[in-house]
Image (cartoon, rainbow, N blue to C red):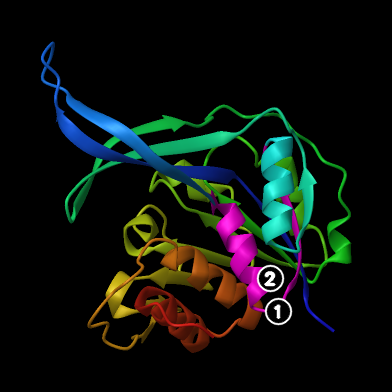
Amino acid sequence: MAKKILIIGDTIVDKSVNLSAIGLSLESPTIKTTFIDEEINFGGAANVAKYAFQFGLDVTFVTCMSSASEIQFTKLNRIRVINLHNSIENIKTRFYVGHGDEKYKYLQINNTHSQSLNLEPSINMNEYDVVAFSDYRCGLISQKMIDQSIISSAKTFGASQVSSHKSNFERYMKMDYIVCNDHESKSFSRRNNVVITKGATGCELNGSAYPTRLIKNPKNIIGAGDCFYAAYLAYENIKRANECAYKHICGEHG
């Protein structure tokens, strides 16, 4: 039977708008473009939930997204979603301008929330083997949710993935495991059951280093941290999580 996991976290809708440069405006120093197409992907905690499902977990995902995004996300991923607020959505829109074989990011607009949404869902966390937080500081996760998970029978994991400010990690200190990167780890002193990712060199757990294979030709760095986190949630094995992240970066599958 698949391990049951409750993932709680902020969904960030990543919208990429592709444009073609046609010249400079005569009125101002601005590039004139024409629209080519746009692509929408689900990032943030939604990416963790997607990978966790792909790694064989029975996933329930607690988040906020629009009704339209929920329909699209569940169509792409057979994951149970508990949508706490369907009128709130975090969107990052990136505009890319291409000319010939070259392409660069022209503009990025972040429309994300930072204030607490004061949501208190009624969820029996004892029904799950694992409760994992993927905190992008968009206001979804409340202290009450964290406290509820700590007193549950589930194994708990915390990851605050956008800031190294000390206060962002203090509320996760009673979790069974914390997952963070090297820079983030410097904001707190706890080291027991703390997984510290170190980019291309691998990661560290309880003072022991776990190097990854040398990456000679990276193809897809974006989302590697989410892939690593989901793999660790699934297998609770550092070497296997390293390998999953390695394959993601190299564009391999499996």
- In the displayed structure, would residue 202 be above or below residue 149? below
* Residue toward you, 110 or 36: 36
Q: What stretch of residues is rendered in magenta?
A: 42-65
Q: Describe residue 12's horizontal placement relative to residue 145 as left or right.
A: left
Q: Residue at x 35, y 85 (%)?
A: 212
Q: CA distance from mark 1 to mark 2?
A: 5 Å
Does the magenta portion include 56? yes
- In the displayed structure, would residue 2 be above or below residue 186? below
In the drawing, what numbered circle is on residue 227? none
Q: Position of residue 225 (x, y in %)?
A: 44, 65
- In the displayed structure, would residue 126 be above or below residue 66? below
Q: Residue at x 74, y 37 (%)?
A: 67
Q: Residue furthest top?
A: 27
Q: In which quadrant will I find the C terminus?
A: bottom right
**Image quarter for residue 150?**
bottom right
**Image quarter for residue 33?**
top left
In the drawing, what numbered circle is on residue 56? 1
Question: Would residue 64 be seen by someone viewing this image from the given angle?
Answer: no
Residue wearing tag 2: 53
Q: Amino acid at mark 1?
A: Gly
Q: Residue at x 47, y 71 (%)?
A: 195
Q: Position of residue 194 (x, y in %)?
A: 49, 69
Does the magenta portion include 41? no
SS of the residue under disc 2? helix
Q: Amino acid at mark 2?
A: Phe
Q: Position of residue 71 (x, y in %)?
A: 74, 46
